[in-house]
Image (cartoon, helix red, strand yellow):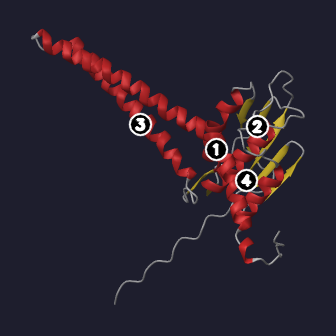
Amino acid sequence: MTKTQPDDPHLAHAAAWSALGVQHAILARAMPVVRHDLAGMLTIMRMGTVVLRRRVAAEASSGAGPSAAAGESIATQLDQLEEHLASLSDSARRLRHWDLGGPAKPEPLAATAELAHALAYPLLAMRGLELALGSPEQSLPSAPAPQQPMLCLLLGAIHILAEDPDPIPACVRVVAAPEGPGLRVQAEGQAADAPPATPAPGMPVLDAAALERLARHLGVGLRHGPGWFEIEAPAAAPAPAAVPPLP
């Protein structure tokens, strides 16, 4: 067995690879939701296209040309197909977050929380858990922050709290952080009848230590305690310097 020294050059990137493994484990939990949205919209569009093709063929075979009612019905179906295409496009754009860098453009924290809700809610709902945004006393902050690191850490915090078996929370809530721009994720109540989370085969359990490693890699402040996480909004990357004009 080879003894590894602390300054072994082979371990120079071990921390980064470990953090990326945590990021993969977090995003892997959201992939079934994106896949379902894409497949569902494609199925609906395929069925709508079949119905539309049959209707057009029936009108053509009649020899009398399409009636006003038939034309209106076809126009309605085309509008529906356009809506489905827009939804399909939105789902496809979510795949940007599976890139290592992810979207660099700052987005409002409230928008990032809404995206995290869309990606995490179906998995929690299958176990009867609630995922709530904001509180009656305070809305989510609108301060802009780079979306990719916030989204990964936010999803990680949501799933860690939801997968905690002792106790299983009835609700995971995302609210504004009490200090500075950021978001707080907290467990509320107890779901006595909820089934435990079922980890994917070969996927290690997410825990606070893993999320801390990812936060350090992303350069984002993270605090946590029993039943809660607080994620500081990272500063936006500086804009590239303008290229001076040629003389």
| Relative depth, front residue between 115 and 192 | 192
Q: Quadrant of residue 238?
A: bottom right
Kind of residue sitting beneath label 4: Gly
Label 3 close to label 1 by CB (< 8 Å): no
Kind of residue sitting beneath label 3: Ala
The extreme left residue here reads 63
Question: Callout 4: 10 Å neighbours few (<14), some, many (20+)?
Answer: many
Real-space CA distance between mark 2 and mark 1, rounded to the nearest whole angstrom: 21 Å
Find residue 228 and report its horizontal and vertical position in percent.
84, 45
Q: Earlier in the sequence, mark 3 or mark 4?
A: 3
Label 3 close to label 4 by CB (< 8 Å): no
| Relative depth, front residue between 98 and 231 | 98
Mark number displayed over residue 182? 4
Q: Please give the residue where the numbered disc 2 appears in the rendered image.
A: 173
Q: Quadrant of residue 127?
A: top right
Q: Please give the residue where the numbered disc 3 appears in the rendered image.
A: 86
Q: Earlier in the sequence, mark 2 or mark 4?
A: 2
Kind of residue sitting beneath label 1: Ala
Q: Earlier in the sequence, mark 2 or mark 1?
A: 1
Secondary structure of residue under mark 3: helix
Q: Please give the residue where the numbered disc 1 appears in the rendered image.
A: 28
Real-space CA distance between mark 3 and mark 2, rounded to the nearest whole angstrom: 29 Å
Real-space CA distance between mark 2 and mark 4, rounded to the nearest whole angstrom: 14 Å
